[in-house]
């Protein structure tokens, strides 16, 4: 008996990495543990991860799930990229997160990430008329009706594919600009939410492909007074879920010293185009908890819960954003004895 395993990895394209994948035909039982799946290789010179004269790189499976597109016993396999000595490749941001996540695992950090994206039909956003613009923003957000909603068939198919894959999808909604949507992943641990977001992104691209539509994580897909696309990142630790003092400590820690710029410069390429200060966030080079990082109203009322970092772009690397937030906030909470 054979099955298809789609090996997926993150490449070295800059400033924003792309997803790559290829199919391995395997014998045996697809239900085996991910650690039992074999290493594989690829040509790193074709993915901006190696020079042509020495281009062999290694794929190490780290997460697998059912393949909802092929069905049957086929699987999707997310991989880390390694050098041939089996050490993490320089583009492997997951390995860096893994060290930080393990160090602070006792604080039980969890994340929910709100992934915005925009559908394009050729060179224009889905729902934009040829050679012009649609009606101004206002009615599209969480809207209904063919005059305001574009791409729902793709969105519903993507949602179903994610659920069949067993991913921790927690919701979807139409966003502020025509052809713009959002799905949410989590709450999950740092590695889990990041792995599953990358697989959900792959499924988004692959699902839209069948409709001859492309999906982009461009943080400013249309210039001018049109909505940007973000990846609002919700975060908590056990102490934050139990008390308000830890929430204030976490918020203040991200505003200390160089931390605001250390974070935003790693929150996705083009962040200055999106975070202009004219909409729901502060300017990219200013920090405020209330605008940059938000304490939701019910959290303030309940005096416990989570915080929401609104700064990350749609094109952010989830391994990087979760690492930065865990490292900054959990270090501060540890120093304050709020663990």
Image (tube, grey):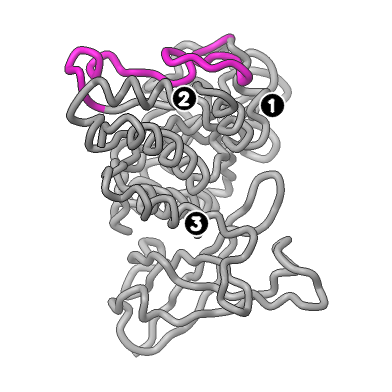
Residue pointed to by mark 2 = 310
- Number of marks in the rendered image: 3
Where disc 3 sits, the SS reads helix
- Distance between mark 1 and mark 2 Cα atoms: 32 Å
Residue pointed to by mark 1 = 130
Residue pointed to by mark 3 = 94
Q: Is residue 147 visible?
A: no
The magenta segment is 278-305
Residue positioned 49% across, 14% down in the render: 288
Decide which of tag 2 and tag 3 comes sooner along the chain: 3
Q: Neighbour class for label 1 at 10 Å: few (<14), some, many (≥20)?
A: few
Which residue is at the far right? 53
Task: Determine whether 99 is above or below 182 in the image.
Answer: below
Which of the 4 image quarters holds residue 215? Answer: top right
Q: Looking at the magenta stretch, what is its main secondary structure?
A: loop
Residue positioned 54% across, 73% down in the render: 59
- Distance between mark 2 and mark 3 Cα atoms: 22 Å
Residue 262 is situated, as x and y percent measured from the top left of the image, at 59, 33
Decide which of tag 1 and tag 2 comes sooner along the chain: 1
Out of 256 and 50, give the one closest to the viewer: 256
Out of 31 and 203, give the one closest to the viewer: 31
Residue positioned 57% across, 71% down in the render: 87
Task: Determine whether 274 is above or below 109 in the image.
Answer: above
Where disc 1 sits, the SS reads loop
Q: 25 left or right of 334?
A: right
């Amino acid at each position: 008996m054979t099955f298809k395993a789609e090996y997926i990895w993150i490449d070295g394209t800059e400033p924003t990495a792309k997803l790559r994948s290829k199919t391995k035909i395997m014998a045996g039982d697809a239900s085996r543990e991910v650690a039992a799946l074999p290493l594989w290789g690829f040509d790193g010179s074709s993915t901006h991860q190696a020079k042509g004269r020495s281009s062999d790189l290694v794929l190490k499976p780290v997460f697998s799930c059912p393949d909802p597109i092929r069905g049957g016993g086929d699987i999707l396999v997310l991989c880390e990229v390694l050098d041939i000595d089996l050490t993490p490749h320089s583009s492997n941001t997951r390995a860096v997160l893994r060290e930080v996540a393990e160090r602070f695992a006792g604080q039980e950090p969890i994340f929910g990430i709100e992934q915005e994206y925009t559908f394009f039909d050729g060179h224009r956003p889905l729902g934009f008329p040829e050679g012009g613009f649609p009606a101004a923003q206002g009615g599209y957000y969480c809207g209904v009706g063919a005059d305001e909603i574009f791409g729902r068939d793709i969105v519903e198919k993507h949602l179903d594919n994610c659920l069949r894959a067993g991913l921790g999808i927690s919701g979807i909604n139409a966003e502020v600009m025509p052809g713009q949507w959002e799905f949410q992943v989590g709450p999950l641990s740092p590695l889990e939410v990041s792995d599953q977001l990358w697989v959900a992104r792959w499924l988004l691209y692959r699902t839209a492909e069948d409709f001859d539509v492309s999906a982009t994580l461009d943080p400013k897909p249309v210039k001018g007074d049109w909505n940007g696309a973000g990846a609002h990142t919700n975060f908590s630790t056990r102490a934050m879920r139990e008390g308000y003092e830890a929430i204030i400590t976490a918020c203040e820690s991200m505003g200390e010293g160089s931390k605001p710029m250390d974070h935003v410069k790693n929150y996705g390429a083009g962040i200055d185009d999106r975070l202009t200060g004219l909409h729901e966030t502060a300017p990219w080079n200013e920090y405020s908890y209330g605008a940059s990082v938000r304490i939701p109203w019910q959290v303030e009322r309940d005096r416990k819960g989570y915080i929401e970092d609104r700064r990350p772009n749609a094109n952010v690397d989830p391994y990087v954003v979760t690492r930065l937030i865990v490292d900054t906030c959990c270090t501060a909470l540890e120093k304050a004895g709020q663990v």
